[in-house]
Amino acid sequence: MLDWTDRHYRYFARLISKHAVLYTEMITTGALIHGDRERYLQFNTQESPLALQLGGSHPKELAICAKMAEEMGYDEVNLNVGCPSDRVQNNMIGACLMGHPELVADCIDAMQQAVSIPVTVKHRIGIDDQDSYAELHHFVKTIAATGCSTFIVHARKAILQGLSPKENREIPPLKYDVAYQLKKDFPELEIIINGGIKTINECLEHVNHLDGVMVGREAYQNPWLLNQVDQSLYGAPDSTLSRHQVLEEMIPYIEEELNNGTYLGHITRHILGIFHSMPGGRKFRRYISENAHKPGATIDVLKNAIKLVTQEQAAALEARATNHN
Ligand SMILES: Cc1cc2nc3c(=O)[nH]c(=O)nc-3n(C[C@H](O)[C@H](O)[C@H](O)COP(=O)(O)O)c2cc1C
């Protein structure tokens, strides 16, 4: 997610779940080919399994960028066919490509020829008035003919004129049954559902019908959701860190980043939700929000915020014990 799932968020998320596949922000082929490629592609090896999401519609350029991803050590490369923003539409990037299934197939084919890591697609269930199931079926069938076998389906259509990207994540209704139908019609494909999923129970319900779930906003705003993923969805033993342990592990990472010139607020903004709905959660968020952006802010901002939560949690425990007595 643009501006959200940067390498700092991903490092943090990986401390919470060892198995969830993490995705970069969408990076356009133009940015990679003409811009500061090192900066865009940089990641910490601990983030793996990690997918690079590309935005573009020129098969050759996408193939070049997919190759860069593979050489850098990414585990998957994903093509964005879901972003509805005007800015990307003008460059034939994102959801508008749903109207051009043959072009998307050419893009995916070129990417697959260039790399041996999986090439996947993230798309909507339709755009504007091209929103019949027959059109979606044709889209998936056309791309699957290239050998692409993983489709991440944001289960609402995009309206390309008149809605902002934010409204396009909220207003068109979610139609999970459409993604379920795709799985019935293409049982050999891996169909992963996305859109509006907020709890592990919802994830478990979806995986009764298809192959996986992608969670966006909730995994960012309430990152502790990821804590249940390894055990509930991957059947891994429950050996995850506590919230406080995760933050302790963030400290040396942040110190190193500060030494390299990263600004504290660029990392701490991603961890504000770790105590979501917990005693002290608001104080933690407020303290960091008020202090991390100050010039010269150091790791002490995080350490002080952790102390505030610890105090608040101790007070909550004491109050509970008093009520019991
Ligand atoms: C701030 C923000 C940035 C996003 N950027 C991207 C992006 O770069 N690529 C993408 O495929 N989807 C992007 N999305 C959409 C999400 O990946 C996801 O499809 C959408 O929010 C619905 O899923 P959710 O309800 O789990 O968040 C973005 C969403 C938000 C809120």
Image (cartoon, rainbow, N blue to C red):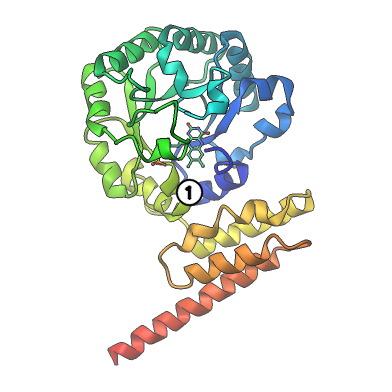
User: What residue is shown with label 1?
Assistant: 220
Nearer to me, 168 or 163: 163
Residue under the point 33% across and 42% down: 233
What percent of the width, then of the height, locates residue 133? Answer: 25, 18
Q: Does residue 301 appear in the picture of this structure?
A: yes
Q: Does residue 54 appear in the picture of this structure?
A: no
What percent of the width, then of the height, locates residue 190? Answer: 33, 24
What percent of the width, then of the height, locates residue 280? Answer: 48, 72
What percent of the width, then of the height, locates residue 117? Answer: 51, 20
Mark 1 vs ligand 1: CB under 8 Å?
yes
Asked which quadrant contains residue 152, the reply is: top left
| Element marked by disc 1 | helix
**In the image: residue 230, left or right of residue 241:** left
Amino acid residing under circle 1? Tyr
Q: Quadrant of the C terminus?
A: bottom left
Residue under the point 25% across and 14% down: 134
Q: Relative to 229, does residue 36 appear above or below in the rendering?
A: above
Crowd band around label 1 with a 10 angstrom C-alpha radius: few (<14), some (14–19), many (20+): many
**In the image: residue 193, left or right of residue 165:** left
